[in-house]
Image (cartoon, rainbow, N blue to C red):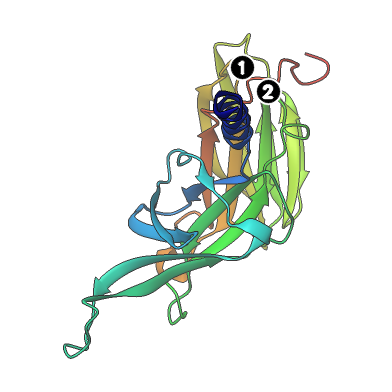
Amino acid sequence: MKKLLYCIWALTSGLSGFAQSEIKHNTFRLLCLDGFVTDMAYDLAAKKIKVFASQSDFSPNYIQPKNGRDLVFYKEIPNPDLTSPFKTIKQTLAIAKPTTPSERMIILLFPAPEGSAVPYESICIPDSYEKHKLETIALYNLSTKLIAVKIEDYLTSIAPEQTTVAPYSSKNAGLAFSLAVNKPSGWESVMSTLTVAAPHARVFAFIKDLSNASTAEGANPVIFRLVYDTQPPPEAKSKAPGL
């Protein structure tokens, strides 16, 4: 009888462990549009999770808090109150507020205007493999300006706070990419480059107004970041239609 009970316990424990290993969490990745943030963390289930954000590539996947709660990013600094038993306190760096539940999310960080309560502002973007397929570029115009984009022979304009997904062909050795901004004086070219036409990848292009601290006479009116997705969906095998 004891042996039978032990076998039942072992079997159910194994099944329970298997079920737990199959649990999938909603995730997010970080990108800083202007600079790097290395000394940063957030709390997940009362545990400190260290994170970082660069301007050249997405961070690894981090787990989202349950129920779409706000993400508070912070760093620990010495406690100015020398009489306190706590040696450090949390200094908030940014507060990300997801507006749409998403299995995968990208959180963009960028410097907040001078005098803001926290040093970084954020934008949460749902990352959909269905809408943003392999060998396409998702163009996010997060600026207040009308943008014109040319990718090889493909030309389109993107209104402020709008997104466009454009196909590209990895058969080309390079990818000609140009960006222009509609200013009161007319269209102004702000960027022209030849980039890699990466096969089996997705490309993200983020366009954002410069912060007050970065504006200078003759400088580009927007920040532009082109990022290759180094973690394309393994299950996605279809390319953009028409290619």
Mark 1 vs 2: CB contact within 8 A: yes
Task: Residue type at mark 2: give it.
Answer: Leu
Vertical arrangement, residue 54 with respect to residue 75, above or below: above
Q: Quadrant of the N terminus?
A: top right
Element on which disc 1 rests: loop
Please state which of residues 156 and 183 is positioned toward the viewer in this rendering: 156
**Residue 185 visible, this orientation:** no
Question: Measuring 64% from the left and 33% from the top, which residue is drawn there?
Answer: 19
Please state which of residues 134 and 105 is positioned toward the viewer in this rendering: 105
Question: Measuring 55% from the left and 31% from the top, which residue is drawn there?
Answer: 229
Vertical arrangement, residue 139 with respect to residue 153, above or below: below
Vertical arrangement, residue 240 with respect to residue 192, above or below: above
Element on which disc 2 rests: loop
Specify whether 81 is left or right of 55.
left
Q: Which mark is residue 200?
A: 1
Residue 153 in percent (x, y) is at 72, 23
Vertical arrangement, residue 197 with respect to residue 74, above or below: above
Marks 1 and 2 sit apart, C-alpha to C-alpha, by: 6 Å
Residue 223 in percent (x, y) is at 51, 52
Residue 39: quarter of image:
bottom left
Task: Residue type at mark 1: give it.
Answer: His
Residue 239 in percent (x, y) is at 74, 17
Categorize mark 1 by other alpha carbons within 10 Å: few (<14), some (14-19), many (20+). Answer: some
Question: Measuring 68% from the left and 21% from the top, which residue is drawn there?
Answer: 168
Question: Measuring 53% from the left and 37% from the top, which residue is drawn there?
Answer: 226
Please state which of residues 218 and 71 is positioned toward the viewer in this rendering: 71
Q: Quadrant of the C terminus?
A: top right
Categorize mark 2 by other alpha carbons within 10 Å: few (<14), some (14-19), many (20+). Answer: many
Q: Which mark is residue 134?
A: 2
Specify whether 235 is left or right of 13.
right
Indicate which disc, 1 or 2, sits on the residue closer to the N terminus: 2
Please state which of residues 54 and 20 is positioned toward the viewer in this rendering: 20
